[in-house]
Image: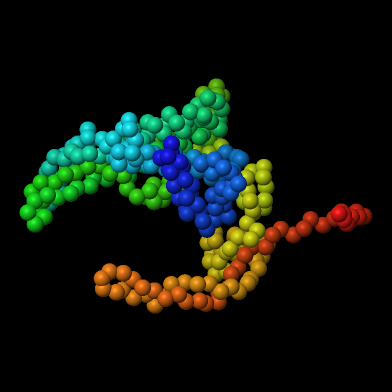
Amino acid sequence: MVSVVRGAKMGVRECQRQFRRGRWNCTTSRRDPSVFGKLMLQVGSRETAFVYAITAAGVVHAVTKACSRGDIGNCACDPTRRGVSYDSRGAFSWGGCSDNVRFGRRFTRIFVDAKERRVRDSRGLMNVHNNRAGRRAVKKFMRMMCKCHGVSGSCTVRTCWLAMQNFRKVGDHLRRRYNGATEVMMNQDGARLVVANQNYKRPTRSDIVYLEASPDYCLYNPGTGSLGTAGRECSKTSLGVDGCDIMCCGRGYDTRTVKRKRKCHCKFHWCCFVKCSTCERWTNVYTCKGPNPTPAPPGAETLSLRR
């Protein structure tokens, strides 16, 4: 369970990094005590789909790493992975103690999918599909690593194994899948998901799918899980999604000047550390305005309540 917790949190952190500049920034509830962190999502949108995929991938990655380190009693690295590869010296056979991603994927499928498989509705099928896409993304970025042995690094003998790559690669890959996500719906017999628009190709097992259109996330709406963008920092000069025009949904922005500290005048000292000074400078910070108050209907009276 320690690895499950670590993997789920890693998935949420990567989600927040991927969407840090958007209206939706993968917000979690600070008051939620669960290990996964309650994501503020209520609809089967593509954002929800991404959260399931990246969280499942995080659990696979963390459990697999724990296996390789020997932290889990009933699994270890995978000595069965072996093959033949080629380099400048020609062909060579390899076979070491690889990351046991097969165990990580199998455990995550049983553990994470258990709740979704109990209810065979469209949302459950969507979640199971996206969990699988996340698990497959981890396997996609397995790469062979080698360590040379011999006099003066002659590499007369080498040990090679398959290892997972940095989780950032998985996050970037799933973000691209999110951008090309496919809208689906339940088929007539209620057994599987089909493409909502027949003009689009059928999604593969590695694609992300969703059921409902995304809200605009401009305003606070607990029904959809949107916290709105009021108070969010934006860039005055950017033309992207982090620009004040897009981020603030046309409501405008407030400007304030703050003093911020940063590292400066860094110098390398032999051997071996870097020493920096701390500089302060005044900078403008732009934050989105909230929605205008709803005007009272004609003839309505405003009551003032006192304690």
In front: 52, or 213?
Answer: 52
Vertical order, 60 against 117 (above or below): below
Residue 95 position by quadrant: top left
How many marks are shown on the rendered structure?
A: 0
In front: 174, or 55?
Answer: 55
- Give the left or right position of residue 285, taking residue 70 as reference: right
Residue 158 drawn at (x, y percent):
13, 46
Residue at (38% x, 48% y) in the render: 167
Residue 151 drawn at (x, y percent):
7, 54
State whether residue 44 appears in this view: yes
Q: Quadrant of the N terminus?
A: top left
In front: 220, or 35?
Answer: 35
Residue 7 position by quadrant: top left
- Give the left or right position of residue 28, taking residue 94 as reference: right
Residue at (11% x, 43% y) in the render: 91
Residue at (37% x, 38% y) in the render: 63
User: What colour scheme does the image use?
Assistant: rainbow
- Give the left or right position of residue 298, taking residue 133 as reference: right
Residue 65 position by quadrant: top left
State whether residue 213 appears in this view: no
Q: Quadrant of the C terminus?
A: bottom right
Residue 44 drawn at (x, y percent):
57, 38
Residue at (33% x, 39% y) in the render: 71
In front: 258, or 209?
Answer: 258
Residue 260 drawn at (x, y percent):
53, 72
